[in-house]
Amino acid sequence: MKTIALVEKYKDGMFEIYTPYLKNKIIGNGKTIKAAKLDFENSFIKIKDTFIEKGEKLPKELHGLTFNYKLER
């Protein structure tokens, strides 16, 4: 499944990436888009790992998930 990951730049120059259309929100932040994407991807990994560690089934929306990054203006 592919979903949109919105990229926003704040007045202080920081970037945030988030998934507005998923029940399980994924968020990343950084001083650059590259840093925010890395944080975002690490957050996604941590979310999946948390489900596994708790012995819970991974939600269907997170299976095979890929992202289409879109700069929010």
Image: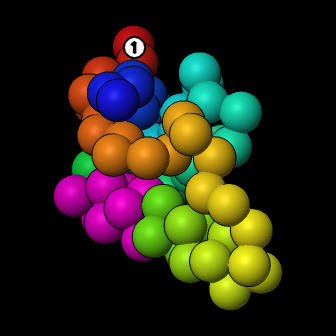
Instruction: Please say which color scheme the image uses.
Output: rainbow
Residue 41 is covered by the magenta coloring: yes
Q: Is residue 51 left or right of residue 37?
A: right
Residue 27: x and y in percent read: 57, 51
x 48%, y 61%: residue? 44
The residue where tag 1 is placed is 73
Q: Nearer the viewer, residue 39 or 72?
A: 39
x 31%, y 66%: residue? 38
Q: Nearer the viewer, residue 7 or 61?
A: 61
Residue 9 is covered by the magenta coloring: no
Q: Is residue 17 visible?
A: yes
Element type at marker 1?
loop
Magenta residues (range): 34-42
- Image quadrant for the N terminus? top left
Q: Quadrant of residue 31?
A: bottom left
Q: Quadrant of residue 20?
A: top right
Residue 72: x and y in percent read: 40, 18
Q: Is residue 31 visible?
A: no
Residue 59: x and y in percent read: 63, 47
x 59%, y 21%: residue? 21
Give the answer, above or below, for where 19 lies relative to 25. Answer: above
Residue furthest toward the bottom? 53
Q: What secondary structure predominates along the stretch shown in magenta? A: helix
Q: Residues within 10 Å of mark 1 (few under 14, many from 20)?
A: few
Q: Is residue 20 left or right of residue 44?
A: right
Q: Amino acid at mark 1?
A: Arg
